[in-house]
Image (spheres, grey):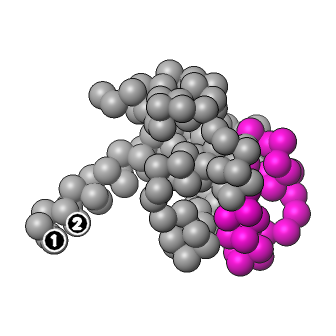
Amino acid sequence: MAAAELAADLGAAPLSREIALTGRPPSTQDALTARRSVEALLERLGWSCGPGLDPHNRAHRRFIDSVGALVRLGYPRGTEQLLPYGRLAAQLAITDLDMVEEQPTPTGQIEVAVALTVLYGPMLLSLRRMAHAQESARRF
């Protein structure tokens, strides 16, 4: 397992993951570039407000940190490269919340929300990896 994957799997702090990914801590310029890329993506998606879009929100911060690692490594991280992922994430959010909304009781809604968080996250990552294997076999 790569150091970055291990750090992520162990729930390492963003800075630890970043150093594992890039071999160095973030620079101010890289962080600014990442933040601008994320802001442009959110604007393009039409995501203008809400608690998940607060830069102090853990998921938002982790996303900015991940884009920052892409910046440092020289990988594409502009709006056009990130937009397909954002659109897929939006569709997943609709699907998730449809499942929550279908539950007739608040307790049922909480249970589904927990299941979506705890079980579906790893399941989606596995599904993505399987899709990569399938597409790789098709292309190469």
Q: CA distance from mark 2 to mark 1?
A: 6 Å
Q: Residue at x 50, y 44 (%)?
A: 120
**Amino acid carrying mark 1 in the image:** Arg
Q: Residue at x 19, y 62 (%)?
A: 136
Of the pair 80 and 71, the residue shown nearer to us: 71
Q: Residue at x 67, y 56 (%)?
A: 34
Is 1 placed left or right of 65 in the picture?
left
The quarter of the image holding the N terminus is: top left
Of the pair 34 and 86, the residue shown nearer to us: 34
Q: Are marks 2 and 1 in contact (CB under 8 Å)?
A: yes
Label 2: how many residues lie within 10 Å, few (<14), some (14-19) or many (20+)? few
Q: Main secondary structure of the magenta part?
A: helix
**Magenta residue check for 34:** no
Circle 1: element type: helix
Looking at the picture, does residue 118 appear above or below residue 33?
above
Of the pair 70 and 84, the residue shown nearer to us: 70
- The circle drawn on residue 139 is 1
Residue 109 shows in the view: no
Q: Position of residue 66 (x, y in %)?
A: 58, 46
Task: Locate residue 6: give its quadrant.
Answer: top left
> Residue beneath label 2, please?
135
Count of picture labels? 2
**Magenta residue check for 55:** yes
Is 43 placed left or right of 86 in the picture?
right
**Amino acid carrying mark 2 in the image:** Glu
Is 47 placed left or right of 80 in the picture?
right
Circle 2: element type: helix
Q: Position of residue 12 (x, y in %)?
A: 57, 23
Is 125 placed left or right of 106 in the picture?
left
Q: Position of residue 122 (x, y in %)?
A: 45, 40
- The circle drawn on residue 77 is none
User: What is the magenta range?
Assistant: 35-60
